[in-house]
Image (cartoon, rainbow, N blue to C red):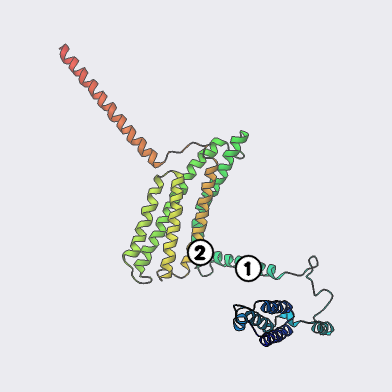
Amino acid sequence: MFRPSTSRSIARALTSTSRNAVGRAHHNDQSKLQLTAIASNLREKRQGRSALAVYNSELKPIQRYASTVAAAKTPFDSVTKDVQDKLYQTKLDVDTEDVSSDSSYVPVIDGGEDEKSVDMLAGVKSDIKTIEETFALTEVPREAYYIGMAGVLPYLATSLSTVYLAWDINHAFETGTGFLLSGHTAELLLHIIEPLQVGYGAVIISFLGAIHWGLEFAGYGGYQRYQRYAVGVIAPAIAWPTIMFPVEYALITQFFAFNLLYFADARATVRGWFPAWYSTYRFVLTFVVGASIVLTLIGRGQIADRIGKMPSTADHIIALRNSQSESLEQEEEDRRQWLVSEDEAEDEE
């Protein structure tokens, strides 16, 4: 059992501690109530626990919490009514040159360009300028530029002709008559243009491979021997069989061949085997040829079920093989009949 003097000393210490903590923070009234409740509880619990144990287990954590909160000095605790009144009375400096009646908003109708829209326009203009510089080919010699662009014109012409003939065939199929040509005439012309485009594409691919041989002969960028010669051999090896494929398969194969050769030429330009302008030059020519192939495939896709299939070289080979087998069978049959007739003539004699 505690002595009365000891209880009064603990109560005075607790009351002093709670007053100091509450005075340092506005929201510590709750801590004071808790301290008071614990102090009254101590008077009731006079048996089984010492005053030091009660202080360490129940009072000391609360005192530490109150001291920590008071020392934090959060903005919400530091802003008082006096500070607010002082802020209200503070006058802002006004600069008449920067502040006007319309400086706080951006006009929507009368002008006023948004920063993002300006940047976007600048980016678009920059992209257009880059495209123009790419297709201008200012670093390419004029002779190579003119002859190269003239070389892709037949390929582009056959592609545009295919697209128009396909449209005319569709028009004749839907209305009963063609726009400029009859459906039958347009189909015949289409079958004439098909091998022209495929054959010309095979010639261009072979020519692009031959350029590697010419630069190797001249020793441009050093002598690379089989690495250059291999490209010159692979190009016609891919191009030549396409003339025997059906049109769609031939054009798709040539499309990949053109892009593969462009990749090889771009790598060779980086290594110094070609002039620095050659990769850009090849990009423009490959772009025109690739776009022409895509247009042709789109045009043919619109009339795939409305035209007859023109026999390809492979079809002619198959037909030749079949005709040869039929002719052999016919010759064998004629020989048998001749032998039979000879036997009958001998019997009669």
| Res 102 → quadrant | bottom right
The crowd level at tag 1 (other Cα within 10 Å; few <14, some 14-19, many 20+) is: few
Q: Are marks 2 and 1 in contact (CB under 8 Å)?
A: no
Residue on which the image places disc 2: 145
Q: For residue 123, which numbered disc appears in the image?
A: 1
The amino acid pointed to by label 2 is: Tyr
Is residue 276 shown left or right of residue 230? right
| Quadrant that contains the C terminus | top left
Position of 18 compared to 240: left or right?
right
Residue 298 versus residue 320 in the image, above or below:
below
Relative height, residue 179 to residue 211 (above, below): above
Residue 33 appears left or right of 141: right
Residue found at the very far top of the displayed protein: 348
Q: Compared to 116, does 38 lie above or below?
A: below
Residue 297 visible in the snapshot = yes
Residue 295 location (% of width, % of height): 54, 50
Q: How many marks?
A: 2
Q: Is residue 92 visible?
A: no
Packing grade of label 2 (10 A; few <14, some 14-19, many >=20) is: some
Of 129 and 11, nearer the camera is: 11
Please state the horizontal and vertical placement of residue 25, each as a whole percent of the image. Answer: 72, 82
Frontmost residue, 332 versus 97: 97
Q: Secondary structure at mark 1?
A: helix
Residue 98, percent from left and from top: 79, 81
- Residue drawn at (32%, 36%), measured in percent from left and top? 321
**Quadrant location of residue 114?**
bottom right
Q: Which corner quadrant holds the N terminus?
A: bottom right
